[in-house]
Image (spheres, helix red, strand yellow):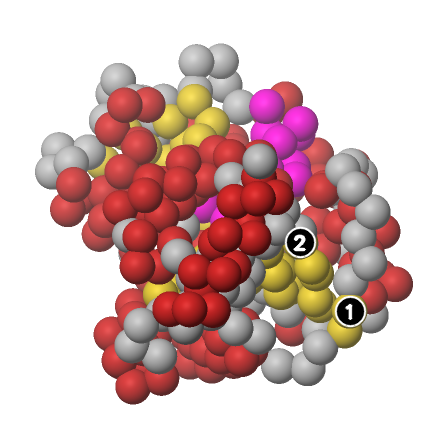
Amino acid sequence: MDYLCRIINDKMDSLTNINRAPIGVFDSGFGGLTILRDIRRVLPQYDYLFVGDNARAPYGTRSRELVYEFTLQAVKHLFARGCHLVILACNTASAEALRTIQQQDLPTLAPDRRVLGVVRPTVEKVGGLTRTGHIGVFGTPGTIASHSYDIEIKGMYRDFEVHGHPCPMWVPLVENRESDGDGADYFVKKDIDELMAECPDIDAIILGCTHYPLLIDKINRYKPEGVNIIQQGPIVADSLADYLQRHPEIERHCSQGGTCRYFTTEDPDHFSPLASVFTGEPVAARRILL
Ligand code: DGL
């Protein structure tokens, strides 16, 4: 039946001149795979192209200008591969580049295509996950310095207090495959203790970096009891499903073959084995230049 529907859709597309292509998913490195995994769980029917800029990660300690420049390069790359919809599965890029890309670049570059981020959907959910209204945010130095979470949360829930805390060591630990090591224990405990010392009333902490779920075992080990840890994958996936329903003009450009292809700016032999641990299926990434 699915097969029949696809043939009919393909026929209709060729008659109406609609180009369908995969949904693009971008991150500086491995972190975006935590978002992609949940997106594919909720929306398995679509095709996906994942780009990880591992060669230039981490982004979180780079200047805003560079994060914008690198992110725009990745978006253009995914557009050139046909994507009509690109998800920035990266908080740093969402916080430091998304608005400029949406407002300045898209209108001339590709007015009928869309780029979405991860900050806004996360903030929309936070209201139901706290009783005290004191929210902690762990993020890269770039995300925390941008104050994106403070601005979005305050815009939506005026009485909430936001406590941002940069964790500059967490992404390097993940990118260097040290998330199970003793160094991870040290830094995760240290950052949680520092955040909670700043405000013991915090009862919800946003993992505002898509790499951080890869440290979830350590985070759960050291977080105080009763504190909600908010992971973005399921939130972003539900929000995307909702978006596609509300925007048929974008949805009809998303191809439905259930496939996923992976591209990295690093050595694929470095990327593929670790990526397959997160995706739960063999990954054969290809190297690209952005
Ligand atoms: N995973 C990204 C984020 O969500 C970027 C981390 C980095 O490259 O520093 O912020």
Q: Residue at x 27, y 23 (%)?
A: 128
From the image, tell me which residue sits under label 2.
260
Q: Residue at x 78, y 62 (%)?
A: 285
Residue at the extreme top: 225
From the image, tell me which residue sits under label 1.
286
Q: Of helix, strand and loop, which mostly describes the magenta segment?
A: helix
Give the SS element for disc 2: strand
Q: Position of residue 210 (x, y in %)?
A: 54, 48
Q: Position of residue 63 (x, y in %)?
A: 46, 75
Task: Name which quarter of the figure residue 64 lies in.
Answer: bottom left
Give the SS element for disc 1: strand
Which quadrant is home to the C terminus?
bottom right
- Any mark on residue 234, and which? none
Q: Is residue 180 left or right of residue 16?
A: right
Q: Is residue 231 left or right of residue 30?
A: left
Query: What are the residue bounds of the magenta stretch?
Result: 208-220
Q: Position of residue 170 (x, y in %)?
A: 62, 48
